Amino acid sequence: MAPTKTNKCWICGRTSDEVSSSVGRPPEALELDSRLERMEDLMAKFNRASAEWGNLVPEQFKTLDYDFIIGNPAQFRSIRFLNEIDDAKKSIVIPLQVAVGNVRNGADATLGGVKIGPSDRSKRKVLLKEIDDFERRTGRYLNGSGGNGDMPHGFAGLFIGQGLSYLRETGLLYFTIQEKLIEAEREDEMSRRPVFAVSIAKVSGLSGDVPVCTVCQNLVTSIVPA
Ligand SMILES: [Zn+2]
């Protein structure tokens, strides 16, 4: 029968919540927790750093093209954070573009260590929805190619300041998607995990039904011969 929230086990006196917390979390769940924590750290760092970029561009460069400046770092050495931009491009923008391309083509994809297989329906849905919303909101295709040409691609035609805000948005999207993918993995993990709860059961030797927790049910069936 369905587990109940408020009933206490007739044998050990614990509620469903008390029983499941006493069983502890499996290693897979703990691993997901620590991945989420690491990811949130990186997101906070990126959020802080990228918020400053726009203010750090010298006034005389503000009407220059983003791609031109980023493509000629030696000329623009006075922009101190160009190496940070390059890192963000390699570790965030490109991996995100590759993952989106693969998911849209129905192929295997990986994002920040989260694997997305062709049959991972919930993860694919999460990623595609976030990307579609992002492209609609920014009026640009994230990828450098593809699409039907009615919107610009990537950083094409953006001034440096606009490009930096777009990069910041892309980075925050990358982390948001990862967060949702890890949550989707967590839900998968929970649905595979055996449920420890109090449910109404028949105990041999007793007339009538009583609430018994999963742990005690297992003990009782192993103690009392059927
Ligand atoms: Zn019990």
Image: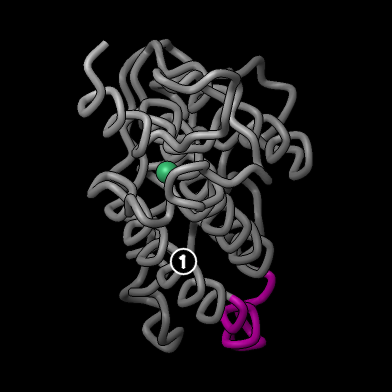
Q: Quadrant of the N terminus?
A: top right
Which residue is found at the position 58% from the left and 30% from the top? 3
Q: Quadrant of ligand 1?
A: top left
- Viewer-nearest residue: 60 or 182: 182
Q: Is residue 139 above or below residue 50?
A: above
Residue 160 shown left or right of residue 31 in the figure = right
**Residue 98: in sight, yes or no?**
no
Scheme of image coloration: one colour
> Residue at label 1?
40
Q: Amino acid at mark 1?
A: Glu
Q: Which residues are magenta?
A: 51-63
- Residue 60 part of the magenta-drawn span: yes
Which residue is found at the position 32% from the left and 54% from the top? 24
- Residue 6 part of the magenta-drawn span: no
Q: Position of residue 206 (x, y in %)?
A: 48, 22
Q: Taken as a whole, is the magenta stretch helix, strand or loop?
A: helix
Q: Is residue 62 above or below residue 202?
A: below
Residue 16 shown left or right of residue 86 in the figure = right
Q: Count neighbours of disc 1 (C-alpha within 10 A) and say few if under 14, some if 14 to 19, many if 20 or more.
A: some
Residue 150, quarter of picture: top right
Q: Is residue 95 above or below residue 70?
A: above
Residue 214, quarter of picture: top left
Asked which secondary structure carries label 1, the reply is helix
Q: Is mark 1 within 8 Å of ligand 1?
A: no
